Amino acid sequence: MKLNDAQIDDLTGKVFRTIVNNGKDGILQSELWKELALTSRDGSRVAIRLEKRSLIRREKMLENGRWTYKLFPVKLPVDTFSIEKAPCLTCPVEHMCSLEGSYSPVTCGQIEEWLVMSLDILNHKKAEAEQQPSQT
């Protein structure tokens, strides 16, 4: 069954989210089609549409003796982890905080605690990712 333009439009968001969810490593076009149960023709139409909108880039590559494309997001969404639980967001003296003031981010114990905790969490996530087997 051939998809019409409205169905292709509906798939575009789903395909884009899947590509973004694979992050900077991208996803092989053939894997994406299998995951979303698309035909090669329909999947290619969606990928080309996303590429024309500058949302993804396609890189031609040889995989298992066959030419295919690997799909990468042009921009990844901003990760809010870096500001989650930042003490400044709820600080009662934030309005008086400045580099030269009596309340300063340079001397703030709450910021120091938050940074240390954030680095510990990032290091833990990195160590977990390194321990997981590669999915290539």
Image (cartoon, rainbow, N blue to C red):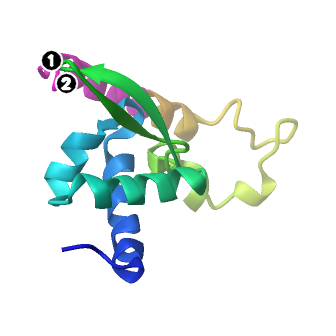
Cα gap from disc 1 to disc 2, whole angstroms? 5 Å
Is residue 123 visible to the viewer in this orientation of the structure? no
Is residue 26 visible to the viewer in this orientation of the structure? yes
Label 2: how many residues lie within 10 Å, few (<14), some (14-19) or many (20+)? few
**Along the horizontal axis of the image, is 98 left or right of 7?**
right
**Along the horizontal axis of the image, is 60 left or right of 3?**
right
Assess whether residue 71 is covered by the magenta stretch.
no
Q: Amino acid at mark 1?
A: Gln
Q: Which mark is residue 131?
A: 1
Q: Which residue is mark 2?
A: 128
Q: Magenta part mainly helix, strand or loop?
A: helix
Residue 61 on image: x %, y %? 36, 23
Foreground pick, 65 / 111: 65
Q: Which mark is residue 13?
A: none
Do labels 1 and 2 touch, CB within 8 Å? yes
Residue 129 on image: x %, y %? 23, 24
Residue 127 on image: x %, y %? 24, 19
Q: Quadrant of the N terminus?
A: bottom left
Q: Residue furthest left?
A: 133
- Callout 2 secondary element: helix
Residue at the image position 63 percent from the left and 36 percent from the top: 108
Magenta residues span 117-136
Label 1: how many residues lie within 10 Å, few (<14), some (14-19) or many (20+)? few
Q: Residue furthest bottom?
A: 6
